[in-house]
Amino acid sequence: MVEHGRKTSGKKDSPSELPSRVTVGGHQLDVLLVERVDRENSEGAMSTQKGYILLKDDLGARSWHVFLHEVLHAIDEVYNDAKLSERSVEHISQGLYQVARDLGWIR
């Protein structure tokens, strides 16, 4: 699945562009846009072991929210032994997205 994804552009001069790679606790994660994520009805997935964050390529305005959601899963896995519930990850990522958008980090 990962080999069929395309990397994001990662333009640093545009707050709207997703990064092409992020590092969480020493794990470098390539951000890949894919047609389909393996899990049913999922918009994103991540694997610190395999080194990727997958995002569906048709998310449009939701791309940043789903990206932050997957980054939070990675942070939770690396620093918190994956103790957060999916509900907690969803709510915290919504809050992070709102703050980042309000600060102009995301357009």
Image: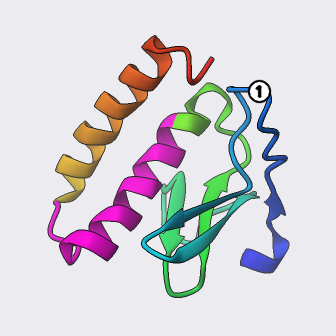
Viewer-proximal residue among 47 and 102: 102
Identify residue type, mark 1: Ser
**26 vs 97: above or below:** below
Stretch in magenta: 65-84
**96 vs 19: above or below:** above
Q: Give percent across and percent down for residue 87.
A: 19, 49
Q: Residue at coordinates 24% horizontally, 56% vertically from top-left? A: 86
Residue 1 visible in the picture = no
Viewer-proximal residue among 4 and 28: 28
- Viewport quadrant of the N terminus: bottom right
Residue 15 falls in which quadrant of the image? top right
Q: Residue at coordinates 40% horizontally, 66% vertically from top-left? A: 74
Confirm whether the magenta stretch covers residue 83.
Answer: yes
- Most extreme residue toward the bottom is 49
Residue 70 falls in which quadrant of the image? bottom left
Q: In terms of secondary structure, where does tag 1 sit? A: loop
**10 vs 35: above or below:** above
Viewer-proximal residue among 71 and 1: 71
Q: Give percent across and percent down for residue 107.
A: 63, 17
Q: Main secondary structure of the magenta part?
A: helix
Viewer-proximal residue among 98 and 44: 98
Confirm whether the magenta stretch covers residue 46.
Answer: no
Q: Give percent across and percent down for residue 36.
A: 67, 61
Q: For mark 1, what is the residue? A: 14
